[in-house]
Structure formats: structure tokens, C-alpha cells
Amino acid sequence: MMMEQLLASPPSWLNFLLMIVFSAVLLVIVLGFVTYAILAERKVIGYMQGRIGPNRTGGKLGLLQTAADVLKLLIKEDTIPHKADRPLFIIAPVIAFVPSFLILAVIPFTDKLYFSDIGVGLLYYIAISGLSTLGIMAGAWASNNKYALIGGMRAVAQMISYEIPLVMSVIGVILISGSLNLNTIVETQANHFWFILLQPIAFLVFVVAAVAELNRTPFDLAEAESELVSGYHVEYSGFRFAIFMLAEYVYMFAMAALITVLFLGGWHPPFPELLPFLTYIPGALWFALKFSFMIFFFIWLRATLPRLRADHLMEMGWKVLLPIALLNIFVTAIIKELFFK
């Protein structure tokens, strides 16, 4: 039973219990993804850089290495600086993590596998994901550490700067599909071409802005170890540090899924009319393949590119991506008026 059917049925304790169970299942799936995404990142970067990567805990493949690291974090002492703002320091990781989990509710993985089919799913995603910035800044300020504060300020400036081109880039998708509903956007691509072909400029802007939103290389200025000793979470240890890391990888999960939905046709195969045999492959497998490619792409960037300088990062957001995104909206509006009436 889908979550949408539960929400449509009359309220009851059974419905409430089922919602809790489905949410717990999703959380377990996400935790499993985070565990092995970290392992995959270590192995891929190791191979790309001529190293082996984890190969001790869990056999030659290191399958239990991340689990061992998580266990180590959970049993480490939870230290709080003496002059920190204690209540805010404690709750900041939760503020950063909860929005990353909430946005998964509107991601459609197939035409039948989703939690909520709301009419403004894309708007919901963008609005809720921006709340994590509050958790990052709260943790940085509450730590009473200059390096943490600088990292928090960088994170806020970066997220605000790149949130604008991120939103602007999807307006072309909204114009063509005529909807903010993520299911409708996917079905529009089934009837036409994938939006990566119809909106290539929007795709490039969105991917660059997405990497910046994720605070990943080459936009990891908020956590620059060589400058800020880990940045906004420098004073965190144990399970609170683990929650910050969990939020980062859950956002990577959500962003890869969103790119798959917006630009790569979701669960639909490429060119079904020209290659009809591809339609026999289950939609969930198509989604998983596209999703995995985006995860690999994020890891590939980390293994390849150096960190940008802070002023160059801000200039790229305001002077390059934003004008290109605005121009794409203008061109898309003209094309929509001429060819998609």
C-alpha cells in the first residue's frame, strides 16, 4: 500500500502505525545507502588515485569498514565545549538532519513506489531542504569556535548563493511540463524527450548548483580541512558528528534521486518507441541505474577536482550560473510559446 492511499483513507490508529512503519523502513533503506555509499566512495576514489581503499574489516572488499567506523563514532565520548551554547549545540545536528529525511517523502521512485504525491512536490523539496542551513549555522555559532563560525558563514553564503540558480534552472522544466508535481514531470518526459535533451543548459546549471548545495568537492569550502580544521562541525564528536555526516549523505541520496526525476526520465527507459525491448526492464531498475550513475558522478568529482577558492566560488554563482539560468528561462519561454502550445 502506498503512503498516498493511507493519507486518503480516514484517520485511524492503524493508519498512523502504518505511516510510522513505512517511515522506519525508508530510514533503514537510507541508512543502508549511506553505509555503502561511503564505502563505495572510498573504494572508487582509492582506485582512481592508485590506492586500494578499505580492505581489512569485512574481507578484501572492506564491506564492514563503514559499519565499524559508525560503531566507533557511537561509542566515542560526546564532548561539548565549556563555553558553547549547550541547548543549541545539542539540537543543531537534528535541525540539519530532519529536513534531509523529510524531503524524501515527495521523491517518486516508480509510478507506484512513493510516499506522497503532492501537487507542489518540487516546491516542497526546495523549501524544506533550505532549512538544513539553519542547523549548520546554529552548530557553528553554538560551538564558540572561530573556525566553526567561519565554516558556518561560508556554508550559509554558499547555500544562499547557489540556491537561486538551482531554483532558476528548474523553471524551464516547470514551463515545459506545466506542473510542480514530480510524478507529472516524469510522465511528461515519457511522452516527449528526457529533459536533459530538452533542457541541457538547465541540467548543467542544476548539477553544478547541486554539488555546491551538497558542500561537496570542489565546493567544500565549509569543511575545508586544510583551512578550517573541518569547519562548522569541528567541535562535534561521537554520534552528533555522525548525524551531520548522515545528513550530508542523505542529501546526496535525495539530490541524485531528484536529478533522475527532473532530467533523466525517472523510471522510464530511453527512447521506448525506437527501442521497445527496453520497456521490459522494470522501472525500479531504470531508476536505480540512473540514480547510481549520479552517485558515481558526485564521487568522481571529489576524486578529480581541486577545491575552489572562496571568492571564485561566489563569483561563479552570481556572475556565471545566475545569468545563464535567467537566459535559459527566457529562451525556454519563447520555445514553449512557439512549439509547445
Image (cartoon, rainbow, N blue to C red):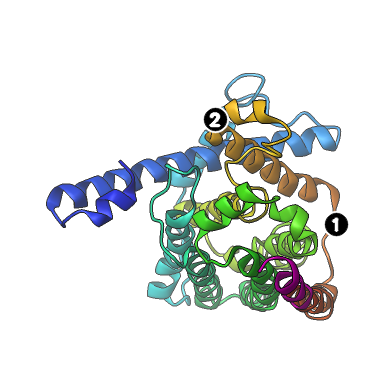
The extreme left residue here reads 13
Give the CA distance from mark 1 to mark 2: 38 Å
Inspect the magenta stretch and tell me whether residue 338 lies in it: yes
Front residue (pair 174, 51) = 174
Q: In the rendered view, would you say 6 is above or below 286?
A: below
Q: Residue 66 in the image: x percent, y percent? A: 56, 36
How would you rate the neighbour count of disc 2 (Cα within 10 Å): few for under 14, some for 14-19, many for 20 or more?
Answer: few
Q: Residue 33 in the image: x percent, y percent? A: 53, 40
Q: In the rendered view, would you say 288 is above or below 159?
A: above
Give the label on residue 89, or none: none
Examine the residues drawn in magenta and state their main secondary structure: helix
In the image, taking residue 9 as reference, residue 45 lies left or right, namely right
Q: Which residue is the site of mark 2? A: 282
Residue drawn at point x = 56 percent, y = 73 percent: 140
Residue drawn at point x = 73 percent, y = 34 percent: 274
Q: Quadrant of the N terminus?
A: top left
Is residue 249 visible to us here?
no
Instruction: Indicate the quadrant where residue 223 lies.
Output: bottom right
Q: Which residue is the site of mark 1? A: 306
Q: Determine whether the residue tagged by mark 1 lies in a helix, strand or loop.
A: loop
Q: Determine whether the residue tagged by mark 2 lies in a helix, strand or loop.
A: loop
The answer to whether the residues at label 1 and label 2 have Cβ atoms under 8 Å apart is no
Is residue 186 visible to us here?
yes
> Disc 2 marks which amino acid?
Pro
How would you rate the neighbour count of disc 1 (Cα within 10 Å): few for under 14, some for 14-19, many for 20 or more?
Answer: few
